[in-house]
Image: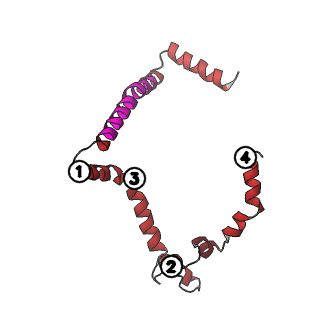
Amino acid sequence: MTLISQGYNTMIGALRTRDQAFLKGLQITIYYAFGSIPLQLGLGLLLAYVLHSRIKAKALFRTIFFLPYVTPAVAAAVVFGTVFSARATSPMNQLVQLFGGDVQRWLAEPRPFLNVVFGLNLEGFIAGPSMALVVVIILGI
């Protein structure tokens, strides 16, 4: 007996015995599928239409709408910039100094950041024959 047929038999058995937990789960699933999803899609389309039409303060509404999507990226960038600051008091510079190293200018360096942090030279690694081999494998040439 396969896993699919076993699950199907379990579902039919739960329907026959009127298992209350199964029926409640089925009720919630049907409500979500036919109630919540169309309502969310409809409201989303209406909001998109309103934001696309000619209304006053359209830029303000778009800003309010996109603010929750942009805020985490901006916050992460601020934290990243603070951690890898060129100041001697930045967390990464304090860690380097703890192990006897000199203050680094992390993001102020002209060389790529990965070279500074990991000591990697990715340009030579990526441009080598390994990239050509991967492209050939992916494209099935």
Tag 2 or tag 3, which sits nearer the N-term?
3
Q: Tell me whether the residue at label 1 lies in contact with that at label 4, contact meaning CB atoms closer than 8 angstroms.
A: no
- What secondary structure characterizes most of the magenta part? helix
Q: Secondary structure at mark 4?
A: helix
42 magenta-colored? yes
Residue position marked by numbered label 4 in the rendering: 139
Q: Which of the pair 120/29 is nearer the observer?
A: 120
In x, y percent, where is residue 49?
A: 32, 38
Segment colored magenta: 24-49
Q: Secondary structure at mark 2?
A: helix
Residue position marked by numbered label 3 in the rendering: 69
Q: Tell me whether the residue at label 3 lies in contact with that at label 2, contact meaning CB atoms closer than 8 angstroms.
A: no
Q: CA distance from mark 4 to mark 3?
A: 34 Å
Tag 4 or tag 1, which sits nearer the N-term?
1
**Disc number lying in front (4 or 3):** 4
Residue position marked by numbered label 1 in the rendering: 57
Q: Tell me whether the residue at label 4 lies in contact with that at label 3, contact meaning CB atoms closer than 8 angstroms.
A: no
Q: Is residue 125 above or below residue 18?
A: below
* Category of crowding for the residue at label 3, using alpha-carbon neighbours closer than 10 angstroms: few (below 14), some (14–19), many (at least 20): few
Tag 3 or tag 4, which sits nearer the N-term?
3
* Category of crowding for the residue at label 1, using alpha-carbon neighbours closer than 10 angstroms: few (below 14), some (14–19), many (at least 20): few
Name the residue type under label 2.
Ala
Q: Is residue 81 above or below residue 96?
A: above
